[in-house]
């Protein structure tokens, strides 16, 4: 019994010894935590992308530099040039615009909240472009080349240091997506070696995210400072293409097939909805375009009505945002004043399904407006054409079709392009249903043969400006 009692006492002493060791460990951990600096974190307090294009959107265009609304709304407002600036009252943006294939350069300011100076190695990891899905294009991740590690030394007590780094491997084609990258600042001195010091307030800890748009060239004309809500569409339409021929082609196709617009042929006068033509009796001679209002309705409601003036002006805006130069032109038949109507070849208006052969119909026009590039290359997103200029099945909008062939191309007794023939006695245009076309219409011109028509009267639109409408 005595031996058992001593054994129990020995076990008790061992248990107390273990408890003592555990208490020592806990005290040591407590002392380590208690003695550790209270603010080991380094903050990213500024981010400034350089070499990018200044940009705006439908709200910032009519805003002051501090983000307040302009009064009156004269336009011209831009995103702040310093994308992130963590000081009270600063305005910021997460939208950046570069030319395709550019090196993305960014200056980041690091602020040290500790009383002592800190040195460390700044690294970047997992730089990537997260491309969104769009129609039949799947979402994808494009991995970029991270900036090289950089040694940094930051004074204490709120001291700062600016570090400029570069990201390469950006796609050399029109694109868009979320630019993401992670950052670490591993301590060398002034903090426990190897400790990651960054406490990044942008997004989740250690990760920064920006919406990146890649244009074909520097934006031009009214989009010299591009609207990112226009780029959201134009970069999706022209995604993956480079050079004015391919980009302008795909943007034209993209607008037609996006179902953002529907030709308002069912309206009594088929008038423009978003383009304002000046009153000839007024002193105002300028054409204006309600881009802000159009985008508000497109993003909030989806498909919007419009005629060829609306569609072509929006197409010009989309092309300009990507650096594609061009003009607007109107085509009339020659030899009559006022202009007499003509009959188009078989077309399906924008907003309807150009892949359905049963929807193609001849339409009576007195004028048709298009976007034209390089003086003679027509882009017409308002209509899908049943045949191309060579008589082959086409069923798409005209893109890079040369004048005067776009107006009319005769092959034997057959007509291709915009014009089918003149209006003759007995022709009666079928009334059009409200947009979009969902059923085939009786053809008013069959069996009459097409006839050759003289080249069109071309009216060039010298330009337009934006107007600020309510809504």
Image: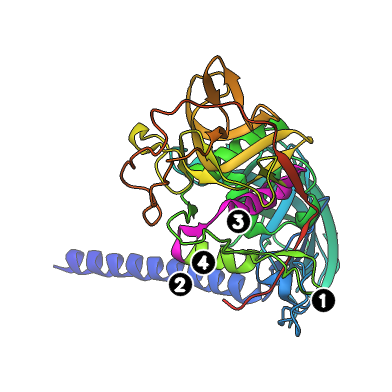
Query: Which of the labelled discs sits on residue 157, or is there none?
Result: 1
What secondary structure is marked by label 2? helix
- Kindly report which numbered mark, 2 or 4, lies closer to the viewer in this rendering: 4
Mark 4 or 3 closer to N-term? 4
Give the extent of the magenta segment. Answer: 301-328
- Marks 2 and 1, how far apart in space? 36 Å
What secondary structure is marked by label 4? helix
- Kindly report which numbered mark, 4 or 3, lies closer to the viewer in this rendering: 3
Mark 2 or 3 closer to N-term? 2
- Marks 2 and 4, how far apart in space? 68 Å
241 on left or right of 258: right
Considering depth in this image, is 320 or 429 the residue closer to the camera? 429
Residue 210 showing in the rendered view? no
Mark 2 or 4 closer to N-term? 2
- Marks 3 and 1, how far apart in space? 58 Å
Residue drawn at (45%, 65%), measured in percent from left and top?
Answer: 301
Query: Which of the labelled discs sits on residue 310, or is there none?
Result: 3
Vertical position of residue 26 compared to residue 245: above or below: below
Q: Name the residue under label 2.
A: 23
């Amino acid at each position: 019994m005595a031996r058992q009692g001593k054994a129990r006492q020995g076990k008790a002493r061992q248990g107390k010894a273990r408890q003592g060791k555990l208490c020592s460990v806990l005290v040591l951990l407590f002392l380590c935590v208690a003695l550790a600096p209270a603010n080991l974190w380094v903050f990213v307090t500024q981010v400034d992308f350089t070499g990018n294009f200044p940009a705006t959107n439908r709200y910032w265009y009519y805003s002051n530099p501090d983000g307040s609304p302009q009064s009156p709304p004269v336009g011209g407002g831009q995103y702040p040039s310093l994308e992130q600036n963590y000081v009270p009252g600063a305005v910021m943006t997460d939208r950046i615009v570069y030319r395709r294939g550019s090196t993305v350069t960014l200056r980041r300011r690091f602020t040290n909240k500790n009383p002592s100076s800190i040195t460390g190695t700044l690294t970047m990891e997992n730089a990537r472009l997260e491309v969104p899905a769009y129609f039949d294009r799947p979402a994808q991740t494009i991995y970029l080349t991270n900036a090289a590690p950089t040694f940094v030394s930051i004074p204490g007590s709120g001291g700062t240091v600016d570090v400029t780094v570069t990201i390469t491997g950006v796609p050399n084609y029109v694109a868009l997506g979320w630019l993401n990258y992670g950052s670490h600042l591993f301590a060398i001195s002034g903090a426990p070696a190897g400790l990651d010091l960054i406490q990044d307030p942008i997004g989740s800890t250690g990760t920064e995210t920006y919406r990146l748009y890649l244009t074909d060239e520097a934006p031009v004309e009214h989009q010299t400072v591009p609207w990112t809500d226009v780029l959201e569409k134009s970069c999706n339409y022209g995604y993956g293409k480079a050079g004015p021929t391919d980009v302008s082609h795909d943007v034209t196709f993209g607008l037609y097939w996006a179902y953002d617009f529907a030709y308002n042929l069912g309206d009594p006068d088929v008038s423009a909805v978003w383009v304002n033509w000046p009153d000839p009796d007024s002193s105002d001679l300028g054409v204006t375009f309600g881009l802000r209002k159009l985008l508000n309705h497109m993003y909030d409601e989806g498909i919007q009505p419009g005629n060829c003036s609306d569609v072509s002006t929006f197409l010009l805006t989309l092309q300009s945002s990507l650096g594609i130069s061009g003009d607007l032109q109107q085509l009339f038949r020659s030899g009559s004043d006022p202009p007499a109507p003509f009959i188009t070849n078989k077309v399906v208006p924008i907003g309807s399904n150009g892949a359905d052969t049963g929807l193609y119909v001849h339409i009576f026009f007195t004028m048709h407006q298009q976007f034209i590039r390089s003086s003679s290359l027509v882009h017409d997103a308002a209509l899908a054409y049943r045949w191309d200029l060579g008589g082959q099945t086409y069923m798409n909008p005209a893109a890079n079709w040369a004048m005067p062939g776009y107006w009319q191309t005769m092959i034997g007794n057959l007509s291709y392009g915009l014009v089918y023939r003149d209006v003759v006695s007995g022709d009666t245009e079928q009334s059009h249903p409200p947009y979009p076309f969902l059923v085939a219409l009786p053809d008013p011109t069959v069996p009459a043969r097409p006839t050759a028509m003289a080249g069109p009267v071309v009216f060039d639109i010298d330009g337009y400006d934006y107007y600020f409408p309510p809504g």
